[in-house]
Image (tube, rainbow, N blue to C red):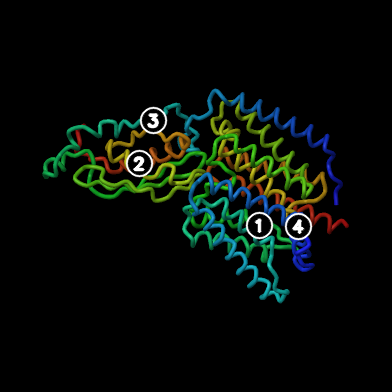
């Protein structure tokens, strides 16, 4: 059995680690809190909202059709349920987005493997997607990374649902 | 007055309990229960405690079956209880009960199957939690490390963790883990790697603290000699860091710890061959 470290040595090591921590924190402060899109490809972004060219115009007249055949044909999204996955350094969020009559009617988080509990973003963000008819959601304070992964997942699902006949 | 009323049996039981709480396993159980209590109060839900209870019952059952199969005397394994509480504190509170049971059962099975002599090779909780991610895509929120609380909660984990690190005499391991962890991510941070910035902040730093204090220091699966402890902590940190930056996700700390367990196995084999 090894003998115990002296209290002085423990205190000195603690102070040294504290100094390393403060230095590391300060060095990384300028670019902290930036969501990272897809760890595997390492692409960074400074956006605080999930920008999506394909979903920005979701509230266009094309999705406001009341169920008429022609309206649905020209709707932005094709009816059905689409899966999407968003990941970042704290894990993965999977969603299932249901489109009916060209509109987003249901968003379900099917898996939430992140450092934060699912309840931090569910049902706030799914409801926001339905209300805005877009993946362009406001991030939940304190769960920024989970919010980002969620937005990515919805965006991926919506890109699959995209109607090729849509001119918008 | 009350002392005069207590009988000798009661006094002996109380002394026995006090003595048990001073043992490493008794202390770590007490401190984990403290984190459990704080995490539960903060979350305002009993789901987490329910998961821990399920994990504890599963561990007791699995340990009993394993001891019976090996024809050892049946007894309550406090090591199994520690493993179960850690599993319950790491799995998200809304994890399905089947996943909690499976993760705990795998953890306890690994303790009995993957071993040298009577010592497990791998940290049982790390095995169970890694299996939960890979096999069941389990959600691991590490709520027991108080990551849902504000940043200052890391100080609570640190103070509670120091008590157990001191008790099991693993400060060299703890310090080497964090020295390498902080240096590695500070170096990466200098090149503006965003992931490195998160390593200094909640919830990543809280989970690293929790692992370093409660899992890395597990006496049967970590070395006792100081120079080996330094290597053990450093290997765990460097592997964790590399996995974190390369793949992200939640498994990096477990893979780092299991790699260090393998290194400990290697040095133990070397010693037995030479010695």
Q: Is residue A35 left or right of residue A168?
A: right
Image location (x, y in percent) of residue A146: 45, 40
Viewport quadrant of the C terminus of chain B: bottom right
Residue highlighted by disc 4 = B18
The crowding category of the residue bearing disc 4, from other C-alpha atoms within 10 Å (few below 14, some 14 to 19, many at least 20), is few
Chain where mark 1 sits: B
Outermost residue to the front: B1
Viewer-proximal residue among A122 and A26: A122
Q: Residue at x 58, y 40 (%)?
A: B244
Q: Where does label 2 land, which residue?
A: A154
| Residue at disc 2, secondary structure | helix
Residue B39 lies, in percent from the top left, at 56, 47
Residue A49 is tagged as 3
Q: Residue at x 84, y 58 (%)?
A: B273
Instruction: Kindly indicate whether the residues beneath marks 4 and 3 are on one polypeptide chain.
Output: no
| Distance in Å between CA atoms under marks 4 and 2 | 54 Å
SS for tag 3? Answer: loop
Mark 1 on the same chain as mark 3: no
Q: Residue at x 42, y 27 (%)?
A: A47
To which chain does the residue with label 4 belong? B
Relative image position of residue A116 (x, y in whole percent): 49, 43
Query: Dot 2 surroundings within 10 Å: few (below 14), some, or many (20 or more)?
Result: many
Q: Is residue B259 visible?
A: no
Dot placed on the residue nearer the N-terminal end, 1 or 4: 4
Badge 1 and badge 4 both on one subunit = yes
Residue under circle 1? Answer: B82
Label 1 Cα crowd, 10 Å radius (few <14 / some 14-19 / many 20+)? many
What element does badge 4 sit on? helix
Q: Is residue B273 above or below residue B60?
A: above
Side of A156 relative to A92 (left or right): left
Lower position in the chain sequence, tag 3 or tag 2: 3
């Amino acid at each position: 059995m090894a003998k115990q470290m002296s209290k002085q040595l423990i205190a000195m090591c603690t102070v040294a680690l504290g100094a390393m921590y403060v230095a590391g924190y300060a060095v990384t402060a300028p670019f902290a809190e930036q969501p990272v899109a897809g760890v595997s490809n390492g692409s960074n972004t400074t956006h605080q909202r999930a920008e999506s060219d394909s979903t920005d115009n979701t509230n266009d007249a094309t999705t406001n059709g009341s169920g008429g055949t022609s309206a649905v044909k020209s709707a932005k999204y094709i009816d059905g349920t689409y899966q999407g996955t968003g990941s970042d350094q704290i894990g993965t969020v999977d969603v299932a987005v249901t489109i009916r009559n060209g509109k987003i009617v249901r968003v379900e988080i099917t898996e939430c493997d992140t450092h934060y509990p699912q309840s931090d973003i569910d049902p706030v963000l799914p409801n926001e997607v339905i209300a805005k008819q877009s993946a362009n959601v406001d991030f939940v304070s304190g769960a920024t990374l989970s919010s980002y992964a969620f937005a990515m997942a919805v965006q991926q699902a919506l890109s699959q649902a995209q109607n090729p006949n849509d001119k918008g | 007055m009350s002392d005069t009323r207590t009988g000798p049996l009661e006094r002996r039981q109380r002394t026995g309990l006090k003595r048990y709480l001073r043992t490493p396993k008794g202390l770590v159980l007490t401190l984990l229960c403290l984190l459990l209590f704080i995490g539960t109060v903060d979350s305002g839900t009993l789901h987490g405690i329910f998961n821990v209870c399920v994990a504890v019952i599963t561990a007791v059952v699995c340990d009993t079956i394993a001891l019976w199969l090996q024809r050892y005397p049946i007894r309550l394994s406090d090591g199994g209880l520690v493993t179960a509480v850690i599993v319950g504190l790491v799995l998200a509170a809304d994890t399905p009960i089947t996943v909690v049971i499976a993760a705990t059962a795998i953890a306890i099975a690994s303790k009995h199957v993957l071993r040298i002599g009577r010592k497990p090779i791998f940290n049982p909780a790390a095995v169970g939690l890694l299996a939960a991610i890979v096999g069941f895509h389990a959600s691991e929120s590490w709520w027991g490390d108080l990551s849902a609380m504000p940043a200052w909660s890391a100080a609570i984990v640190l103070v509670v963790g120091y008590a157990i690190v001191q008790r099991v005499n693993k400060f060299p391991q703890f310090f080497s883990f964090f020295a390498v962890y902080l240096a590695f991510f500070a170096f990466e941070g200098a090149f503006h790697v965003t992931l490195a910035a998160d390593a200094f902040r909640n919830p990543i730093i809280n989970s690293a603290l929790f692992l370093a204090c409660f899992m890395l220091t597990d006496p049967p699966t970590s070395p006792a000699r100081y120079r080996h402890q330094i290597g053990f902590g450093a290997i765990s940190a460097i592997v964790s860091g590399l996995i974190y930056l390369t793949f992200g996700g939640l498994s990096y700390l477990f893979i780092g710890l299991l790699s260090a367990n393998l290194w400990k196995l290697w040095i133990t084999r070397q010693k037995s061959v030479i010695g």
